[in-house]
Amino acid sequence: MALPLPLRQHFDYLLDASQPAQVGCRVRVPFGNRTLIGIVWQIAPDDSFAADKLKPVQALLDTTPVLPELLCRLLSFAAEYYHHPLGEVLISALPLLLREGRNLSDYQPKAYQLTAAGRALDASALKRARKQSELWQALLQHRISESLLGQQYSRTSLKQLMDKGLAEEVVVPASPYTAPATPASGLKLTAAQALAVTAIHQAFGRFERLLLEGVTGSGKTEVYLQSIASLLCQQQQVLVIVPEIGLTPQTLARFQARFDVPVLCWHSGLSDSERLHCYLQAQSGAAAIIVGTRSALFLPFWRLGLIIIDEEHDQSLKQQDGFRYHARDLAIKRAALQHCPIVLGSATPSLESLHNALNKRYIHLPLPDRAAGQALPGFELVNLKQQVLQYGLASQTLAQVRQQLAAGHQVMLFLNRRGFAPALCCDECGWLTECQRCSAFTTYHKQSRQLVCHHCGASKAIPRQCANCGSTKLTPLGQGTEQLEENLQQLFPATAITRLDRDSTRRKGALNTLLEDIHQHGARLIVGTQMLAKGHHFPNVTLVVIVDVDGALYSSDFRAPEQLAQLLTQVAGRAGRGDKAGKVLLQTHYPEHALLQDIIQNGYASFARSALMEREQTRLPPYQHLSLFSAQAHQAALCQQWLTQLAEQARQFPALQLLGPIPAPLERRAGLYRWQLQLYSANRTAMHQALSTLLDTISQWPLSRKIKWQLDVDPTDL
Ligand code: ADP
Ligand code: ZN
Ligand code: ZN
């Protein structure tokens, strides 16, 4: 059995012969003084000697596996690749209700039919019970579904028939969706789109990886839609994985509007029973298309014909805690197991995927132009040096904002810092509000009247006095979106402003109300964080202002330039998507910075290719494989000691190069010190062998129990 425990081992239990268990079924088993839900993983032949020592399974919960064979293979690969305990991996792939051991049939549609006794009954037997007799007559003709029952027949009569043993309940799994007779028609494709759709069609029925590298507004979604159309006629299913925040009703609506088949969504906002419903619809084939966030990758499908990963560069595809998998990479594995193609789409592909496309491991499908012929927005640098700024905005920025508003257009202002100000500062002594538990300042949130740490989430009331000198003169330092909104409102009192960030969209449904407002042109100025960057199509936005990028220019993470280039390109891509041309103003103190110059002069495609060359020279991913061990403890010395010990062991593997132990960029979080050791290798197999050996060694160290430690394979965040 695989049990949901952080242990790298399996456990044996006794199944009696009357329990027809299969691999992938759930069982309830005793474990210590608890009971756990586990997954049958291997079935060993009868061995009466061992049987004496084994505890019996308490209950077998499924007659057919909740994890079909293909998913078992995918998850076992994942557990091995990410060196994560199998039991936790298997369990994390199941909807919560199944993890809790709920009975699957309780959630499946039900129907009622007559038992043998019921069918043999003489009509006269029920003549004194008119309602029961009517129901019995109807059941003689056909089964009656749960939903019909309440409308047409009385539940009491049914219960009476069941009590007499005349009727019974049966589970009727949903049936596969009805395939449309002809493919749904779409827009007339551009030449580049047509080539892409043809290439995808040619890949149907076999494993193939395709990278759709299409600039913002190039019509990637139209390519997805037209690729899907013919698959649906063959009654195949499609899985579309989108970033966390990209899954708006607008996205879903585009799929629903095009096809007359069931389109379901899957994301963290669903209730547990909604998730189970989605799981069952995917499994039975009742759902034709599922649009979901990363964990949709673990849904069972009846007949999966294509996987699409939209915004494949997006960081939310990587799970950052617990079982740290990359949804893109596991989706590729899944496509290989399913023998179906996978399309990775992005305007700003990850360097990993681009590398594979340039190497011809993936089929490369470029869409270099916008679909409706609009020009890509031009960048203009606004030098902030020696400028008098008004609320962080240069005078020429303000002039252009005014001009666009006067013309009736919408303007977007991007600032990747939520809250009112990144810190409160004492006017007398310069003291700054700091988080007690992290090496970070606390953000001032004016509306909620709190200081919030954006790293550990801790919040507290705003202090009256400086903790250092007692002065009461505390002023906000720097600017966040909340303040930018307030300031803009002063500058443009008659203009409606909308703010899009994690604070303004916390309430359920709030994001959609705000997006609707933008689409209806209710909001003229749109202020927001990177939430603005993700795939939205706002045709009336003609100007995008990037208020401040300077913080992101100098970071220790080797991926920082790639991420900044992606962010800038994606944000810029919101401009000029309608029939009016767009423009991007980039405010900076470093207009001569090489990265900014490269992006604005040559665009992302060119930046990415030169960044790849740099990675090759510096032997960084994708040219070498990277794994990251991190240690956390209340004392930094413990982290250091543990990682030093680990580094000594790791040095015995000639295939590994080490960097560290070094403190993590945020050295202390939620009261714990954080240190790391980076392992690089050109040889993936050698890396994984080394990791296995190291993990065995670690498990034997007493120190490993005194600290918190993790291994992250292919980390995206250092
Ligand atoms: P992307 O996903 O690449 O950002 P979208 O699929 O959202 O691009 O398309 C951007 C806009 O271009 C949409 O309004 C879409 O309707 C339009 N569009 C896409 N393909 C075509 C086409 N072949 N002809 C005309 N307009 C198109
Ligand atoms: Zn002070
Ligand atoms: Zn904190």
Image: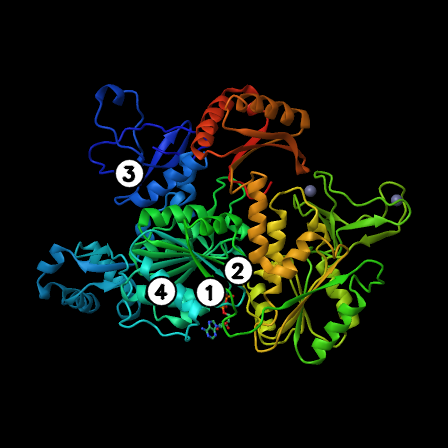
The type of residue carrying mark 3 is Val
Q: Is residue 380 left or right of residue 505?
A: right
Q: Residue at x 56, y 38 (%)?
A: 619
Mark 1 sits on what residue? 220
Q: Is residue 535 left or right of residue 594?
A: left
SS category of the residue bearing label 2: loop
The type of residue carrying mark 1 is Lys
Q: If you read the primary sequence from the N terminus, does the residue marked by circle 1 or circle 3 appear first?
A: 3
Residue 642 makes an appearance in the image: yes
Of residue 529 and residue 503, the one placed in the foreground of this image is: 529
Q: CA distance from mark 2 to mark 1?
A: 9 Å
Q: In terms of image quadrants, where is residue 260?
A: bottom left
Mark 4 sits on what residue? 198
Residue sitting farthest toward the bottom: 407
Asked if the residue under mark 1 is in contact with the one under mark 2, i.e. CB atoms within 8 Å, the reply is yes
Asked if the residue under mark 2 is in contact with the one under mark 3, i.e. CB atoms within 8 Å, the reply is no
SS category of the residue bearing label 4: helix
- Indicate if the residue with disc 3 has its beta carbon within 8 Å of ligand 1: no
- In percent of width and height, residue 512 lies at 55, 66
- Indicate if the residue with disc 1 has its beta carbon within 8 Å of ligand 1: yes
Q: CA distance from mark 1 to mark 3?
A: 40 Å
Callout in the foreground (1, 4):
4
The type of residue carrying mark 4 is Thr
Q: CA distance from mark 3 to mark 2?
A: 42 Å
Q: If you read the primary sequence from the N terminus, does the residue marked by circle 2 or circle 1 appear first?
A: 1
Mark 2 sits on what residue? 347
Residue 355 vs 644, above or below: the answer is: below
Q: CA distance from mark 4 to mark 2?
A: 20 Å
- In percent of width and height, residue 458 lies at 68, 45
Mark 3 sits on what residue? 23
SS category of the residue bearing label 3: loop
Q: CA distance from mark 3 to mark 4?
A: 39 Å
